[in-house]
Image (tube, grey):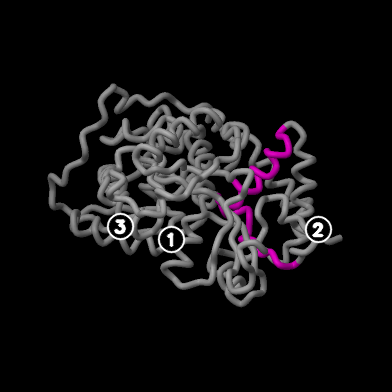
Amino acid sequence: MKKTTSKLKTWMKGVFVSSLALTVAACGSGGQEAKPADNNAGTQPAAQPTDSSGDPQKLVIYTGRDKNIFEIVLPKFKEKYPNIEVDTLEMGAQQILERVRAEKANPQADFWWGGTQSALATAANEDLLEPYKPTFADKVPDLYKDPQDRWYGEMLLPEVIMYNSQVLKPEEAPQDWDELLDPKFKDKIVIRNVLPSGTMRTIYSAMIFRQGADTPEKGFEWLTKLDANTKEYTQDPTNLYLKLDRQEGVISLWNLQDVLIQSKKNNHPYDFIYPKSGAPILVDGVALVKGAKNQDAAKKFMEFLMSPEIAAQLAKERFQFPSRTDISKDELPDFMKNLELKPMELDWAVMAAKEKEWMQHWDENIKGKGKK
C-alpha cells in the first residue's frame, strides 16, 4: 500500500469535504506471490448476485465485528434472503487470518467480515482470498481496496486515546502518543491483549514505524516505556471495558468507532482524545474466502453489506466511517461533518511486511518487562 500522505489527504479532501465536510484499516508478512485474478477481471464490475432460487443456502462468516453491528445487518439480510442460513464466528482479525490459513485445503468459512488492511493484504498474498469485482467497485478509492479485487475496505477506523471521563477531564488525559509515557500515568493504562487484535497490532506497529522503520529499536524502547505504564493487558474488549468501568485503569488505546458506540449507545463513561500528531487510520475490510463452499451467498452478502443504504445506517447508528465515496452527506450523522481526522504518516506496505516480526519481538522481549 502506498504512503498515506498525498493520496490519503487528497481523497479525504475530495470525499469528506465535498461529501461529508470531513477530512477523514493492518497483520503479518505475506507468503507466496498471489496469482492474478482470472475471473471478474474485465473493466465492468460483476453483475450483482440475484436470488434466482428459493433453495436453502448457507453462509459462514468469520468476523471481527461486534454484535451491535450484527443486530442491524443480519436481520435485514435475512429479510431480503430468507433462504440463506447465516452462521457467524467471532474472533480477532489476526485470529481470522490464522484460521483461514490453517483451513486453506478445506475452507470452512465463506466470508471474512472485519479485517485490517494488513491482515487482508497478507491473506491475499498467500492466495487465501477469492477475487471478486463487486458492482460498487468504482465507488471505493484505490487506496482502500486490493488492485486484484481480493478484498475491499468497508469502513475507516481512526485509532485514538480512550479515557474514563468520570475520572479524567479532557485536558487531564494524554493529548498525544508520547504523553502516554509520562510517569504520572503509571498503572493507569489498560490495553487489550495485542497479538490477537488487528487494531492493537496496528497501533503498536505504528508506534514503531513513527520512530523509524529502519531502526525499530527506537520503537521497541518506546513500547517498553509504555509497558512500564501499563497496568494490565486484558483478554478481550469486554474485559477491557470492565476494567475501565471499574477504574482499574482509566486510559486505553482503541478505535474511535467503538469508543463512540460504547459511550453513546452502551452508556459507558468513555471519551477520546484525537492525538495532535495524527492517528493511524485503518481500513476495515471484507473478502470472500478462496474455495468457499457458498460463494454465491457470500457475494450476495458483500453487495448487501456495502450498499449505500446499509452504509448510511451504520454511519448513523454505529458511527461507522464508510469507505464508499458516493454516500450522500444528508444520509450521514452531523458529527462526521465536524470532526477533522488527521492521518499519521505511515507506509502500509512496510507495516504489513514488518508487523509479524515486530509483534513477536514485543511479545517475547517487552510485554510485562517494562517495569523491571
Q: Amino acid at mark 2?
A: Lys
Q: Which residue is mark 3?
A: 73
Is 103 on the left or on the right of 19, as rendered? right
Please report whichever mark, 3 or 1, sits nearer to the chain's N-terminal start.
Answer: 1
- Whether pointer 1 and pointer 2 mark residues with C-beta atoms closer than 8 Å, the reply is no
Residue in the picture at 50% in, 40% down:
117
Query: Image quadrant of residue 188?
Result: bottom right
Query: Image quadrant of residue 39?
Result: top left
Query: Image quadrant of residue 30?
Result: top right
What range of the chain is rendered magenta? 187-213
Q: Residues within 10 Å of mark 1 (few under 14, many from 20)?
A: few
Image coordinates of residue 196 in percent, x first then y, are: 58, 54
Q: Amino acid at mark 3?
A: Val
Badge 1 marks a residue whose secondary structure is: loop
Q: Is residue 185 magenta?
A: no
Q: Is residue 212 magenta?
A: yes
Q: Which residue is mark 1?
A: 66
Residue in the picture at 75% in, 38% down:
216
Q: Which residue is mark 2?
A: 369
Residue 199 against residue 356 in the figure, above or below: below
Residue 92 against residue 221 in the figure, above or below: below
